[in-house]
Image: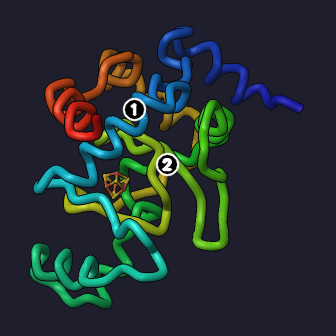
Amino acid sequence: MISLKQIVIEQKYSKKEKQCPASTQDLFLNTANRDRAIQTKHIKYGPLNVEEPGDYWKNIAKKWDTTEKAARKSKCIKCTAFDVSPRMLKCIPGKTSQPVEDEHGILGYCWMHLFKCHSARSCNTWAAGGPITENEDSYEWQKRNLKAALDPEPIDPEFSRKEKKDNE
Ligand code: SF4
């Protein structure tokens, strides 16, 4: 049953502020933003294979000037931009090729780079304070990032065009 508090929260935000972010509904858009996050030097989302991370954690520890052990504790699941609120988890299954949950963790939405990221990964722009677990907090992020969240175009269209050309 929906509580009074939940009803008040739902009424507080506009339809657009509650709409699913574009990349949760569009696989191509999600892939474009994800690939940008993987390949862009200041982001470097990874590791690609969580079971065989290679030097990923070593490199990220070096960048953060910390130990590998500490870096391994700074994953998406603890990032301030990682959204696994109930309303976002309803958006995420959308049209996806990945399971929402696996043995390593769960998919959430990244408010910094606008794609579905995995709780067991990380990136150079990780920031403490997450995850986002309440609908109200999720709507607030969307309110502050409304244009970007609903934008049907990739964050970096030029990067996506180049990537598409390279794959042809
Ligand atoms: S910004 Fe945070 S949630 Fe987004 S990919 Fe980086 S670590 Fe993950």
Asked whether the residues under the numbered discs 2 and 1 touch, taking CB atoms below 8 Å apart as contact, a structural biologist would say yes
Image position of 88 with respect to 37: above or below: above
Q: In the rendered image, which residue does mark 1 sit on?
A: 141
Q: Amino acid at mark 1?
A: Trp
Q: Can you give x and y, in whole percent of width and height, for residue 71 in the image?
A: 28, 80
Quarter of the image for the C terminus: give it: top left
Residue furthest right as drawn = 1
Query: Are there few (<14), some (14-19), or many (20+) residues within 10 Å of tag 2?
Result: many
The residue at the point 66 percent across, 72 percent down is 103
Q: Can you give x and y, in whole percent of width and height, for residue 31 in the image?
A: 40, 39
| Residue 56, quarter of the rendered image | bottom left
Q: Amino acid at mark 2?
A: Ile
**Is 89 on the left-hand or right-hand side of 79?**
right
Image position of 146 with respect to 118: above or below: above
**Is 25 on the left-hand or right-hand side of 112?**
right
The residue at the point 47 percent across, 44 percent down is 116
Residue furthest top as drawn = 15
Q: Secondary structure at mark 1?
A: helix
| Residue 41, quarter of the rendered image | bottom left
Q: Secondary structure at mark 2?
A: loop
**Is 86 on the left-hand or right-hand side of 157?**
right
Q: Can you give x and y, in whole percent of width and height, for residue 51 in the image?
A: 48, 81
Q: Nearer the viewer, residue 36 or 117?
A: 36
Q: Earlier in the sequence, mark 2 or mark 1?
A: 2
Q: In the rendered image, which residue does mark 2 sit on?
A: 132
Q: Which quarter holds ligand 1? A: bottom left
